[in-house]
Image: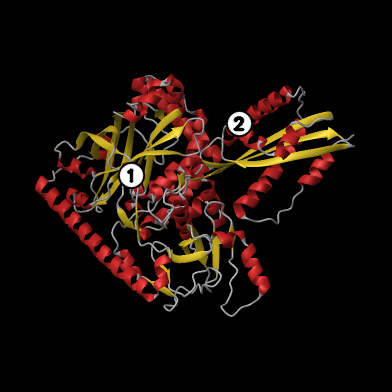
């Protein structure tokens, strides 16, 4: 038996053993049985449907985690063995493996439901990323900055391994994309107008799970491969920047796209051009209708009351490619929000953990927005982007959620999320902090001084002071009441005398409508490794800081373990907004202290995974300095770090530094 077969058999046996040990085989078997029972004829089960169910439930992530540590290192295999065995990238949403055309031809033959087609997309390296020549010359920067290429098609997501930030980045990956199953042959492939969406992000290796900077976002119509007689095409895709740099070239990406299995018939160029012209004509007509409708609708809104011109109401906004789109099309219904989050409160906490960027538009309600997939992949966005993401997630939980466009008390534009219950009582959600509150409502005849005082003291009501409109992916409501203060507004959006609404059927005809749902990937970070590194790093920094003050440092490992429960309580309070949790921490600490000893502690919340940054942020607080530089008799310090993972490898990091000392 060859070495490759031996390694394959060994891996197969380890996978089977791991699945049995973890009980995952029973879960998958039960899932397949449920699919079989739902079909009239179990023999007609689509393998792609089973795979889709496996990925949507997060089972593939669990399977990979059970035996990830058992896989042989890549350095142990020769290049030929590596190519034949295939690769599994822990960062990919689907299994990224090398396949042969014959495999698809044999396994996916014609049946009563048609043939399933796939795209094999190969990235063959980048060129002419001239803006990053300075990074290449600086070896330190080159190693700390990395490129990551993300690929989107419908609801499928993929990404490459991080590569060094160079002028010619070495993107060398293969992706297998499911195009779909078609009954009427290859001609039906031509009607799939969903393009490949390619995103390149620059990440900081020192902060690998803190998001990155968007370098380029481009779309490519893959259907040109249907014109080839051999089923594949190689080309160089010119990449452009985003936003104001939309027309500025960023670099070139060499690619090869193969349709699998190779179609038995070839699409004529004339047929292709006819289809593209038809799609272009429909899109342009849809855009013209939207522009005409939006102008008329806004004129009607402004004619109701002269003061409406000062209200923050927008029907459209520019996206990352400077295309003017209806704002409602930026929202998408999530595919698996209820799978990756326990409650809507956890979803709001997740959004608050993303990096908040300052909006460049200070004099208007909304100018530039970015698609949801960019916000999720880059883990950052403006307050408007975060509001759109939070609203989409809340819609996935079945809440009656809306993005609210309004202003602060000082008239600065602001956006947030509003949910309405069945009685139209509002609940405000701050996407930056995940805090929620019910606005204090006044009637026009109310003169209760105490109630007005509560309104003036409410910080969040001062922040979200005036409301212009509410919108989501299916509805749009403009406030046409005489008052736009949130404390005076009637929130019954079905009352035409108070709110000017759009028909859902009209919104459904808007251009740029997305037919796919975005998918969130479960967390796959090694929390124990991050915790160990941070604790060791902060311990060294504390010792160095005390050494500069000519103070010795001793550590209490037993009491350090007791502080973890308090960090978990802090995270529960932050992620759910609750406060009624039984807190045994004080009793446990006092019980552990010897007689006559006192305890001091300091807690900090951060997303930084660098010990130095985390320690510096803590030392900015005087209470932390008192703990670190504690002087006295028999002083011992404690350190505890807890890492709480969330989807997309977003983490919430909590640290507690404590000390015990003998009271004098």
Residues under numbered marks 1 and 2 in contact, where contact means CB atoms less than 8 Å apart: no
Residue 70 in view (yes/no): yes
The disc placed on residue 365 is none
Question: Residue at image x 27%, y 63%?
Answer: 290
- Which quarter of the figure is the N terminus placed in? top left
Task: State which quadrant residue 606 falls in.
Answer: top right
Residue 5 in view (yes/no): no
In the picture of the structure, the residue carrying the numbered disc 1 is: 244
Residue lying furthest bottom in this view? 445
Question: Residue at image x 38%, y 75%?
Answer: 304
Residue 613 appears at what percent x and percent y? Answer: 59, 33
Task: State which quadrant residue 619 falls in.
Answer: top right
Q: Does dot 2 land on a helix, a strand or a loop?
A: helix
Q: Say which of marks 1 and 2 sits in front.
A: 1
Way the structure is coloured: secondary structure
The answer to whether residue 130 is above or below residue 275 is above
Residue 31 appears at what percent x and percent y? Answer: 46, 50
Depth order, front residue of 214/480? 480
Residue 73 appears at what percent x and percent y? Answer: 46, 24
- Which quarter of the figure is the C terminus placed in? top right
- Label 1 CA crowd tier, 10 Å (few <14, some 14–19, many 20+): few
Q: Does dot 1 land on a helix, a strand or a loop?
A: helix
Question: Residue at image x 44%, y 55%?
Answer: 388
Residue 184 appears at what percent x and percent y? Answer: 19, 53
The answer to whether residue 288 is above or below residue 493 is above
Depth order, front residue of 216/119? 216
The answer to whether residue 545 is above or below residue 421 is above
In the picture of the structure, the residue carrying the numbered disc 2 is: 611
- Label 2 CA crowd tier, 10 Å (few <14, some 14–19, many 20+): some
């Amino acid at each position: 038996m060859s070495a490759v077969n031996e390694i394959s058999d060994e891996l197969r046996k380890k996978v089977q053993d791991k699945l049995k040990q973890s009980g995952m085989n029973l879960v998958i078997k039960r899932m397949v049985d449920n699919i079989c029972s739902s079909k009239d004829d179990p023999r007609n089960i689509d393998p792609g449907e089973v795979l889709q169910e496996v990925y949507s439930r997060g089972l593939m992530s669990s399977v990979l985690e059970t035996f990830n540590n058992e896989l042989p290192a890549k350095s142990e295999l020769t290049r030929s063995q590596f190519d034949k065995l295939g690769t599994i990238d822990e960062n990919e949403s689907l299994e990224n493996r090398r396949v042969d055309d014959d495999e698809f031809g044999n396994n996916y033959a014609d049946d009563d439901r048609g043939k399933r087609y796939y795209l094999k997309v190969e990235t063959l390296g980048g060129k002419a990323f001239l803006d990053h020549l300075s990074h290449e010359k600086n070896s330190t920067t080159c190693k700390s900055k990395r490129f990551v290429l993300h690929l989107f098609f419908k609801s499928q997501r993929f990404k490459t391994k991080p590569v060094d930030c160079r002028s010619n980045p070495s993107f060398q990956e293969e992706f297998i994309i499911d195009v779909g199953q078609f009954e009427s042959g290859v001609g039906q492939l031509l009607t799939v107008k969903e393009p490949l969406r390619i995103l390149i992000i620059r990440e900081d290796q020192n902060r690998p799970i803190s998001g990155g900077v968007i370098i380029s976002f481009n779309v490519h119509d893959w259907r040109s491969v249907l014109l080839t007689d051999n089923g594949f095409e190689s080309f160089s895709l010119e990449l452009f920047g985003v936003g104001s740099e939309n027309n500025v070239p960023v670099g070139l990406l060499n690619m090869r796209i193969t349709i699998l299995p190779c179609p038995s018939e070839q699409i004529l160029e004339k047929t292709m051009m006819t289809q593209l012209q038809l799609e272009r004509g429909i899109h342009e007509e849809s855009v013209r209708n939207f522009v005409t409708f939006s102008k008329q609708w806004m004129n009607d809104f402004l004619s109701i009351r002269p003061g409406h011109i000062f209200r923050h109401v927008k029907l459209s906004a520019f996206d990352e490619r400077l295309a003017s789109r209806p704002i409602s099309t930026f929202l998408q219904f999530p595919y698996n929000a209820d799978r990756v989050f326990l409650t809507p409160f956890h979803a709001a906490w997740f959004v608050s953990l993303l990096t908040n960027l300052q909006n460049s538009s200070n004099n208007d309600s909304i100018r530039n927005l970015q698609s949801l997939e960019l916000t999720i992949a880059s883990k950052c966005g403006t307050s408007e982007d975060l509001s759109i993401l939070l609203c989409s997630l809340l819609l996935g939980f079945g809440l009656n959620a809306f993005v609210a466009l309004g202003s602060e008390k000082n008239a600065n534009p602001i956006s947030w999320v509003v949910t309405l219950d069945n009685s139209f009582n509002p609940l405000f959600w701050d996407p930056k902090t995940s805090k929620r509150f019910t606005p204090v409502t006044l009637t026009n005849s109310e003169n209760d001084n105490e109630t007005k005082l509560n309104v003036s003291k409410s910080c969040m009501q001062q922040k979200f002071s005036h409301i212009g409109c509410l919108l989501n992916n299916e509805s749009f409501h403009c406030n046409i009441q005489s008052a736009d203060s949130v404390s005076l507004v009637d929130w019954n959006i079905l009352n035409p005398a108070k709110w000017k609404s759009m028909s859902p059927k009209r919104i459904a005809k808007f251009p740029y409508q997305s037919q796919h749902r975005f998918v969130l990937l479960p967390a796959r970070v090694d929390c124990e490794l991050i915790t160990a590194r941070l604790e060791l790093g902060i311990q060294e920094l504390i010792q160095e800081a005390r050494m500069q003050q000519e103070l010795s440092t001793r550590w209490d490992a037993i009491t350090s373990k007791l502080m973890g429960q308090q960090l978990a309580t802090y995270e529960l309070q932050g992620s759910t907004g609750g406060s009624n949790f039984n807190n045994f921490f004080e009793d446990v600490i006092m019980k552990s202290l010897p007689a006559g000893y006192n305890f001091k502690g300091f807690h900090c919340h951060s997303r930084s995974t660098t010990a130095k940054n985390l320690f510096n942020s803590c030392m900015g607080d005087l209470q932390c300095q008192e703990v670190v530089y504690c002087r006295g008799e028999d002083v011992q310090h404690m350190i505890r770090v807890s890492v709480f993972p969330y989807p997309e490898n977003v983490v919430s990091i909590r640290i507690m530094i404590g000390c015990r000392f003998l009271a004098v």
